[in-house]
Amino acid sequence: MSGVKCFKWFWHQLRNFLEEVNDPFKNDETALIPSEKLDQFAELGAFGAVVPEKFGGAGLNNTQMARIAEIVGANDLGLGVTMGAHQSIGYKGILLYGTPAQQEKYLPDLATGKRFAAFCLTEPSSGSDANSIQTRAQKSDCGKFYILNGGKIWISNGGIADVFTVFAQTPISQPDGSTKDKVSAFIVERQFGGITNGPPEKKMGIKGSNTTEVHFDNVKIPVENLLGVEGEGFKVAVNILNNGRFGIPAATTGSMKYCIQKTIEHVNQRVQFGKKLKEFGRIQEILTDMVIRHYVAESITYSLASNMDAGATEYQLEAAIGKIVSSENAWQVCDDAIQLHGGMGFMRECGLERVLRDLRIFRIFEGANDILRLFVALTGMQIAGKHLQQIANDIFSGNISALVGEVSRRVFRTNGSEKISDLVHPSLKNDASTLNSLIVKFGKTVEQLLKMHRKILLNVNTN
């Protein structure tokens, strides 16, 4: 069977499970996904979708994984969070930074769902400020272990995980002989001992997923379980989140599709004032906006995923933008769906209120949208600032060819609307021209701000 046929079979098997076996309403009501359902989900290969085939996974690429996340998000975001916490961030560090020995040891059981993974970063005193974590890992006197102490909160899969990616402060020797605390990442097993977790949190939404506190009391971690380079754990955490962040746009795209389909069915059947709802202009306007919001999020999702599959390494801005846009669009689409359902939309049996509750967390976790907005703006301006600095250096050094090249680029950028128009349908040519004008205006605004605040902007750490 070819790779495409294998994926189609895999996708249909998962969809059948979601439609015929999984019960999102019961999972929400009981705040639990039954273990037998998770076992069935695991047997289909859902928990090892991104693991290479040599380790027992499906070896899906990012675009294929986005399609899986989309159908799960359309059915049950609680199950989606369980799956995402396991593979999008839980063991993603082992895929990205694990040594061959670490990958061989852990990935087979994680791929089959025999063991669950969790990502342990957030603490009571450190939400968006990950560098301020208090959990510590001190190397033992014998040098064979790190001794881990501390606690994490709001950990998805915290109560069911056997393998944890944990971030802790470690003392790092400096060139001058002093030591400085820096974050390091570790692979920690529950069987190491000293690991406990609190009861499942009572959440507003995604109730089927397991969320708990996780506590570490003198946990002995073998030194070979250091993940990546000692002292570079913050980089590990950021790259894990950036790499897995496209899963949120994919899942929320699925949720939007569910809301839209449900709403279309309703407005085609519901009659008011002698007319079906679909015949009213205002209803059509709202539905149009819902579809546009879905289309935008879907486009961002698959553009990002395909770029990652093509080998792009600088996609953190696109991932952050995708997370912001999709989570906020999904919230609006679901809210509009409830509105168009009238009083029925407010009832539990309609199912939309569950989706709305589930969606609320997506604007908070894996990077709060407010922080990500700052990240997008600052990172983008720093890139432009470094470019301007290079131009200045070229001018002072007498590099005329570089200056001519920059002038040419600016002329092309200003007059490039025809180039954009060549890429779109004739009916969109005016919009393409408008887009080009906005891009030019945006670029000029960024340059003006950089001239005013260059020193501040270029020195702020976005890592």
Image: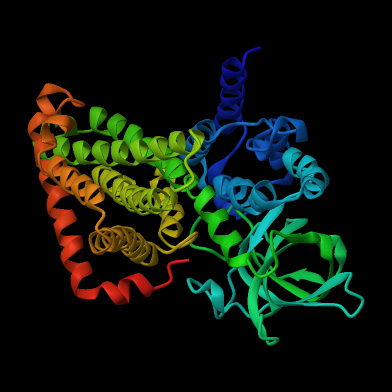
Say which residue appears at 24% left-offset and 43% top-offset.
340
| Image quarter hosting the N terminus | top right
User: Hey, which residue is sitting farthest left in the picture?
Assistant: 430
Left or right: residue 157 versus residue 244 is: right
Q: Along the line of sight, which residue is nearer the eye, 124 or 41?
A: 124
Determine if residue 188 is in view: no
Q: Along the line of sight, which residue is nearer the eye, 458 or 111?
A: 458
Q: Check the image and report above or below for 42 versus 199.
A: above
Determine if residue 432 is in view: yes
Say which residue appears at 33% left-offset and 63% top-offset.
382
Q: Check the image and report above or below for 277 versus 209.
A: above
Q: Quadrant for residue 188, please give it.
A: bottom right
Say which residue appears at 88% left-offset and 73% top-offset.
143
Q: Check the image and report above or below for 404 versus 153.
A: above
Q: Position of residue 455 (x, y in %)?
A: 30, 76
User: Hey, which residue is sitting farthest right in the picture?
Assistant: 142
Left or right: residue 409 versus residue 154 is: left
Q: Along the line of sight, which residue is nearer the eye, 349 or 171?
A: 171
Q: Position of residue 118 (x, y in %)?
A: 67, 57
Q: Along the line of sight, which residue is nearer the eye, 158 or 460?
A: 460
Q: Position of residue 189 (x, y in %)?
A: 81, 60
Say which residue appears at 41% left-offset and 35% top-offset.
302
Left or right: residue 441 versus residue 182 is: left
User: Hey, which residue is sitting farthest top in the picture?
Assistant: 1
Q: Position of residue 6 (x, y in %)?
A: 62, 19
